[in-house]
Image (tube, rainbow, N blue to C red):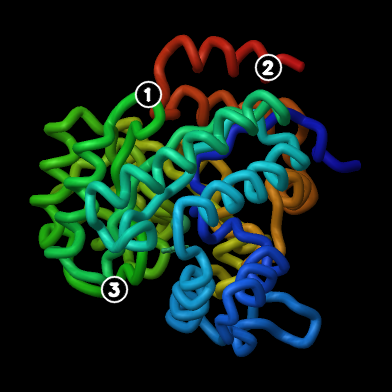
Amino acid sequence: MSYKSLPKVELHLHLEGGAPPAFIRNLAQEKHIDISGIFDERGNYLYRDFDHFLKVYEAACTTLTGPEEFRRLTLAVLEQSAENGVVYSETFLSPDFCGGGDVQAWRDYLAAIEDAAAEAERTMGITLKGIITCIRHFGPEQAKTAALCAAETKGDFITGFGMAGAELVGRPGDYAYSFDMAREAGLRITCHAGEWGDAAMVADTLRDLSPERIGHGINAIQDLALVDRIAEAGVVLEVCPGSNVFLGAVPSWKEHPIARLQERGVKVTVSTDDPPFFNTTMAREFDMLAETFGWEEEQLRMLNDVALEAAFCDEATKERIARRLLA
Ligand code: ADE
Ligand code: ZN
């Protein structure tokens, strides 16, 4: 039994991280860029651990040299998502990889991404919104340029701001200026925390950056009082179990805390993070939840409902997507 055709909502997908390896290899060939070292003999991405994953990710991004490459990337990623039943997706976009944080360059990249999103909506029936992320290990100063790009381009498509990258670099409060700028511009806030950092990192992120959603957040399970506070506050976790198991943040699907977090009252959602890097899809995530925890269709549909409620889009879009989830 596979849930491939079940309609799905995904909140946590890095656009560059969704690039199929063949797509990146083709671009590298076109542009004579040698990144052969980032692939294994079967053509999949190859890396040792999370830090190395970030390096391989950034090497793959060197082939994405302009707006046209991002237009093609967006279509390639959305094709994969739509094939796996996704009807609504929010993707992380990093101006650092799109013109180096320059606002005018970012506008050109964004126009191409939005153009592709509109095409995908017409041809594949999938709706996309964008969340701008700063990259934590690039430091607080560079984060400000990402926040400025976010503030300048907030609108119907760019609806949120967040932070990805190496979680153990710096402290959440170092990035408060950028998050405040984004919030003041009217953007909704999410932030990666508790993927590699401990429960205290999640608590500090909540205290210093006040996100309404947390990317991963799974290590909150180390502190049940914190879990209760997250549940009470209605903060939503963007959980990516396949990513956590593949990267070794959690030893196995069986030991993944998603079910325990949900049982304790936390609003959990499910996403792929960087699907081709972790050999996953939204269909596989749903299938593995069913297989591992015995979740039935009703529980899987509930994940969609929680995700749609927590989505950063406008109400009219939510109503339209809600009707599609009934299929
Ligand atoms: N960027 C892409 N994938 C990521 C992850 N799993 N954690 C932090 N930053 C990321
Ligand atoms: Zn992520």
Residue occupied by mark 1: 156
Give the mark nearer the N terminus: 3 vs 1: 1
Q: Residue at x 14, y 50 (%)?
A: 178
Residue occupied by mark 2: 324
Decide which of 225, 312 is in the foreground and name it.
Answer: 312
Q: Residue at x 46, y 23 (%)?
A: 309
Camera-near label (3 vs 1) is 1
Would residue 161 be seen by someone viewing this image from the given angle?
yes
Q: Residue furthest left?
A: 177
Task: Give left or right: position of 144 versus 249.
Answer: left
Asked if labels 2 and 3 touch by Cβ distance under 8 angstroms, the answer is no
* Ligand 1 lies in quarter: bottom left
Label 2 CA crowd tier, 10 Å (few <14, some 14–19, many 20+): few
Q: Position of residue 282 (x, y in %)?
A: 68, 46
What's under tag 1, amino acid-wise? Asp
Q: Is residue 87 above or below residue 29?
A: above
Rounded to the nearest angstrom, the CA distance separating label 3 from label 2 is: 39 Å
Q: Quadrant of residue 320?
A: top right
Q: Residue at x 77, y 30 (%)?
A: 6
Asked if labels 1 and 2 touch by Cβ distance under 8 angstroms, the answer is no
Q: Residue at x 40, y 37 (%)?
A: 236
What's under tag 2, amino acid-wise? Arg
Would residue 303 be seen by someone viewing this image from the given angle?
no
